[in-house]
Image (cartoon, rainbow, N blue to C red):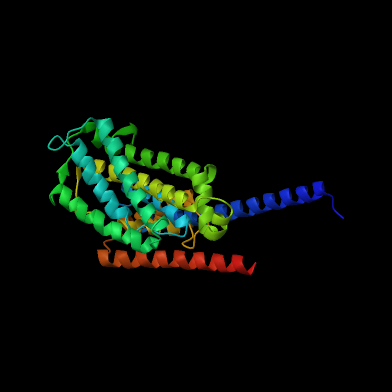
């Protein structure tokens, strides 16, 4: 017969073993995604004319930044077994509002104030999404689909259906400035936000509760956690990253285009899934999301340089996403059988 002390030690050892197993699974997912990225890059390095040029990799990092940041926010929502279809048009609306806040033809606010208000718009979008899901009980797919359409319409209305030029060198430098020679600031901002997202997911209650809700929402509720409150917070976190993605996207070109954004949500979700985050919830991987976003843009850039028609690029991307979802299903089936 074991003593209480021995039982406690056994439970501690079991918890350690469980954490080690989860860490190994996450590491294997990251290694698999990283290996796929390296293989795709090497393939295009030799197969695509001009892909080996010195400017290609910085260009891929530049293109990946905005979509990658959107994917970081989507990772938190998908970890709860939800979905956010509004990140693309939400990004567009935030970019339009940045133009309205900062453009001298509109409000012409100070640079810092304009950025904070733009992030505030993203947080508001996340709050509305979260409230619709958590309080009104609307399924995430429908709630964020409605927001996707509403944000697209508002962007067109507020901008007068025309682009807004942002006459601010400081704003333009957010993406195009150079602190490290040969590397645009957009890549550094993406890296910094990836680190922030990783800390939020692994070291804070936001990440822990997102994974808990995705694993078993009812059990999480019965354990005394205010699921409604935390769902709203999680969607607001996604809104924060949506606003940051909007700032990166619009500062890259120096203007806000209200007709863009539709379809970017699919690229962001694809990056999340390729990176190893489960659509069933309960498992998320921030580093994997970053790698998934890089893989998507490397694939697109390589296919473009090979002269592959855009419609076939979409086919290839769709196949990659399908394989990623299939791999996720296989992993879950094996875990259930174990």
Residue 207, percent from left and from top: 50, 47
Residue drawn at (43%, 43%) of the image: 194
Residue drawn at (23%, 30%) of the image: 110
Nearer to the camera, 167 or 227:
227
Residue 314, percent from left and from top: 31, 65
Q: Is residue 48 visible?
A: no
Residue drawn at (26%, 63%) of the image: 310
Instruction: Choose top left, top right, bottom left or bottom right for residue 302.
Output: bottom left
Residue 65, percent from left and from top: 34, 46
Residue 271, percent from left and from top: 40, 56
State the quadrant of the C terminus: bottom right
Residue drawn at (33%, 57%) of the image: 265
Position of 249 with respect to 233 (left or right) is left
Q: Spot the residue most to the right.
A: 1
Position of 261 with respect to 217 (left or right) is left
Q: Is residue 327 visible?
A: yes
Nearer to the camera, 200 or 331:
200
Position of 256 with respect to 21 (left or right) is left
Instruction: Choose top left, top right, bottom left or bottom right for residue 321.
Output: bottom left
């Amino acid at each position: 017969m074991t003593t209480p002390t021995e039982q406690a030690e056994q439970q501690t050892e079991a918890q350690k073993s469980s954490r080690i197993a989860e860490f190994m699974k996450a590491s294997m997912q990251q290694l698999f995604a990283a290996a796929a990225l390296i293989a795709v890059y090497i393939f295009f390095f030799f197969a695509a004319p001009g892909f080996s040029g010195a400017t290609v990799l910085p260009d891929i990092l530049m293109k990946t930044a905005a979509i990658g940041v959107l994917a970081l926010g989507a990772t938190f929502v998908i970890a709860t077994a939800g979905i956010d279809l509004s990140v693309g048009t939400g990004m567009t609306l935030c970019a339009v509002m940045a133009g309205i806040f900062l453009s001298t033809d509109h409000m012409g606010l100070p640079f810092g104030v304009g950025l904070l208000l733009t992030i505030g718009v993203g947080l508001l979008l996340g709050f509305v999404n979260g409230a619709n899901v958590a309080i009104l009980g609307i399924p995430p797919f429908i709630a964020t689909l409605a927001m996707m359409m509403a944000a697209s319409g508002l962007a067109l209305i507020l901008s007068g259906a025309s682009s807004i030029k942002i006459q601010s060198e400081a704003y333009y430098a957010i993406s195009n400035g150079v602190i490290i020679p040969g590397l645009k600031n957009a890549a550094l901002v993406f890296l910094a936000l990836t680190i922030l997202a990783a800390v939020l997911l692994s070291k804070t209650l936001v990440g822990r509760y997102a994974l808990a809700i995705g694993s078993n929402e009812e059990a999480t509720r019965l354990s005394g956690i205010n699921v409604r409150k935390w769902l709203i917070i999680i969607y607001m976190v996604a809104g924060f990253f949506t606003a940051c993605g909007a700032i990166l996207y619009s500062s890259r070109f120096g203007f806000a285009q209200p007709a863009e954004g539709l379809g970017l949500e699919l690229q962001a979700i694809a990056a999340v899934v390729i990176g190893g985050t489960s659509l069933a919830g309960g498992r998320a991987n921030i580093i994997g999301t970053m790698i998934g976003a890089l893989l998507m843009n490397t694939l697109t850039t390589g296919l473009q340089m090979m002269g592959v028609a855009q419609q076939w690029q979409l086919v290839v991307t769709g196949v990659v996403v399908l394989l990623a979802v299939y791999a996720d299903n296989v992993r879950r089936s094996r875990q259930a059988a174990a």
